[in-house]
Amino acid sequence: MLGFLPSTTIHTALADCGNWESKNDKGQVAGHGCVKLLYFLRAVDFQGCGNVEIDLRIAAIALDKSLYTIRRWLKSGLEMGFFRGSRRVATKQYRIFYTSLDKICYLLNIADIGACTDIEVCDLKNAKFIATEAQTKQLQERSKFQAKEGKRKNLSKCIPTAEVLTTSDLCTGAILSKVGRFTYLKFYAHPHGASQKTIAHQSGRHVSTIQRRLSDGYREQHALKPIPKTQLLAQPVRTVIGHEPASWDKTKTIAIRGIDKGFKQKIWKTSLGYFRLCPNVYDIPLELTPKRRLRSNIKRSLKDDSFKRRFAQEDAFKRWMAGKGSKFLRRKGCKFISSDYET
């Protein structure tokens, strides 16, 4: 048994598997399970040699699944190309050879791996929740960067942090008031955040799925901590006097022109005045990792023909070894690991 909890890096495009999730012959979704097993093997491979000898019972305990499920994930991973081969060493103990991430992204035609973050092995059972949190944190950081660029052009605007917007009860500076889940900002504040529609589009999921994963009630059902969040409402830069339609209502949102440099904005009439709707702000404690080298390798693998030729040669050699190649090399006295090529 493992005496400690190793950590691994997950990638939202693989961990959420919304854009490529496939099914096996029995009609059961196999992609997400294969990814969990892949990340577990990468975590326990301390030497980084691409193969690891592991007892499947340890993987079942760490991933909170049955031994039958782990074996099914292993079989599906061999069919999908997540694992290059497996060899039985002892009872319920296997040496598994897993595929590199750049080749997996090439096989699945994934150009962007999304946000990356480090988690412990015991948190792999909630990989989809953590992937959604990481994607939200990445979009929010990008929105904050754009807000800083806008602040440089207009020095009169300020950028409240996510911690101040979600946890603090003080209404100072750019914060006008806080009522329930809404935070009202003054006109000179530069709001930022993450739209649930954008998160759903990048993750390949429905908007209701993203809303459910970020909701407090659904997270409590899975023994997860709620995420502090708030809905931002900012005062429009230009006044709406003279543009108020007769059908405005306090409970409806409409879009009109003539506000904020002529762009369409959804305006909400409240007891404090007119406010434009802004994205939500989440206070997520995750730390993102850049993984620039992996991203460049994935882009090059999709564009460069040398990667395609190398993968084609590996597949051809694997088919040859599964046929007459292994017998031919044995007659020549060559030593090799048959499990690398025989699945």
Image (cartoon, rainbow, N blue to C red):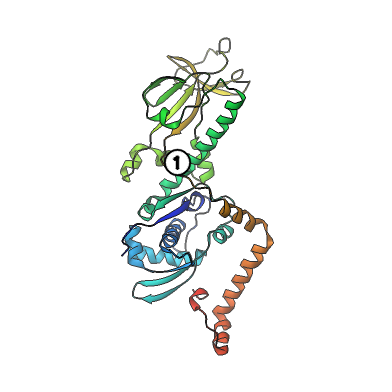
Q: Camera-side residue: 147 or 240? A: 147
**Label 1 sits on residue:** 210
Is residue 76 visible in the rendered image? The answer is: yes
Rendered location of residue 91, percent (x, y)? 33, 75
Pick the residue in front: 113 or 20.
113
Who's the residue at 36% across and 67% down the image?
56
Q: Residue at x 58, y 13 (%)?
A: 243
Q: Residue at x 47, y 27 (%)?
A: 160
Residue 300 is situated, as x and y percent measured from the top left of the image, at 64, 56
Q: Residue at x 44, y 55 (%)?
A: 32
Left or right: 68 in relation to 155? left
**Which amino acid type corresponds to the residue marked 1 in the rendered image?**
Ile
Q: Position of residue 235 (x, y in %)?
A: 51, 18
Vertical side of 16 occupied by 100: above or below:
below
Against 301, is 16 above or below? above
Quadrant of the rendered image containing residue 30: bottom left
| Residue sticking out furthest to the top | 242
Q: Secondary structure at mark 1?
A: helix
Quarter holding the N terminus is bottom left
Q: Quadrant of residue 316?
A: bottom right
Number of marks in the rendered image: 1
- Image coordinates of residue 304 in percent, x first then y, are 68, 59
Report whether residue 206 is seen. no
Q: Residues within 10 Å of mark 1 (few under 14, many from 20)?
A: some
Q: Is residue 166 left or right of residue 220?
A: right
Most distant residue in the bottom direction: 331
